[in-house]
Image: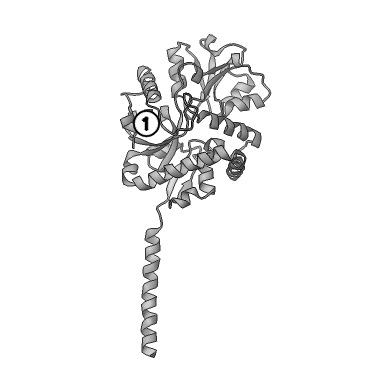
Amino acid sequence: MKHLTVIGALLLLAVIPLQAQSQRQSKPEPIIFTPQWTAQAQFAGYYVAKEKGFYDEEGIDVQIVHPNATQSSEERIRNNTSHVTTLQLAQAIQIISDGVPLVNLLQTSMNNALVIVSRRGKNPLNQRGARVAIWQAGFTQLAECMVKESQLDYEWIKAANSVNLFIAGAVDASVAMSYNEYFQILQSGISITEDYVYRLSDHNYNIQEDGLYMTRAYYQNHKEEADKFARASRRGWEYVAEHPEEALDIVMEYVQRNFIATNRVIQGLMLQEILRLQLDPDTGERAFLLRPDMLEKASDLMLRNGEIKRPITMEDLSR
């Protein structure tokens, strides 16, 4: 009996390392997700999916890593530092044209948020040759194409924070996002009427912006995980639309954790506008799909203005 007990103990000791090895092997490889900007309500759906356990329920380990001053989200996806990122459609088109194949996993934006705000009490389109602030970090393709098409001959003033230049009166106008810098300008106390604002979405430039993207090479090797990530992310955004105040609580946790200088009022306005931009302009529904007509419009516009080398089609972006 004593011999049998010893043998049983030895067998148990042999099984424990095998179980530990099996657990290590079954642990999912982390998916590194980088939104295209610092923590804010623009990415509420992903924060909610993470905090409510939607990614865990799909059996995937998602790590949210925001970009920093030395490496943008676009650079991280180009050099495979991150597996997934959010990009504006125009950015994705340019990256593919540069020779980095991408897959669109999920389309969240259905409308364009770019605006040009004038400080001089004039329609921005009546200010040929104006000094206009624009982001040094990018996101500028469509604005630059529009200005070329309209023959405005703007003098672009690149800055890390275009709002500061605008508020200080150092520029005539500024490119802004309707969900971000536009609200910052209003909160600064500057009186802006719609006559001072040129919204690209109202002038035949309504081209989708944010979507989830992954390199085609990574997607081909991780199709199941990528599909799960897209499904859980969509669920996160649907939860945000149904529970905006709870989502805003989660956003503010991320904002504070990342030491972002903002406030709940601005983030609440941003979230409200982001949710509005997610509604399809024709159906009023949250479809989460890339529209072929908007892709074709963006590709034609960018090709015509020398931003890309070849047309980009749905085939280039489809899973």
Q: Residues within 10 Å of mark 1 (few under 14, many from 20)?
A: some
Q: Quadrant of the C terminus?
A: top left
Q: Which residue is mark 1?
A: 95
Q: Compared to 115, does 245 lie above or below?
A: below
Residue sitting at the far bottom: 1
**Residue for point 63% across, 16% down:** 193
Residue 51 appears anywhere in the view? yes
Residue 275 quadrant: top right
Q: Amino acid at mark 1?
A: Ile
Residue 39 appears anywhere in the view? no
Q: Is residue 203 left or right of residue 265?
A: left
Across the whole image, how many numbered discs are drawn on residues? Answer: 1
Q: Quadrant of the N terminus?
A: bottom left
Q: Position of residue 51 (x, y in %)?
A: 54, 48
Foreground pick, 155 / 17 = 17
Q: Compared to 28, does 101 lie above or below?
A: above
Q: Position of residue 198 (x, y in %)?
A: 54, 17
Q: Is residue 315 left or right of residue 276?
A: left
* Picture colour scheme: one colour
Q: Position of residue 279 (x, y in %)?
A: 50, 29
**Residue for point 56% across, 39% down:** 242
Which element carries disc 1, helix, strand or loop?
helix
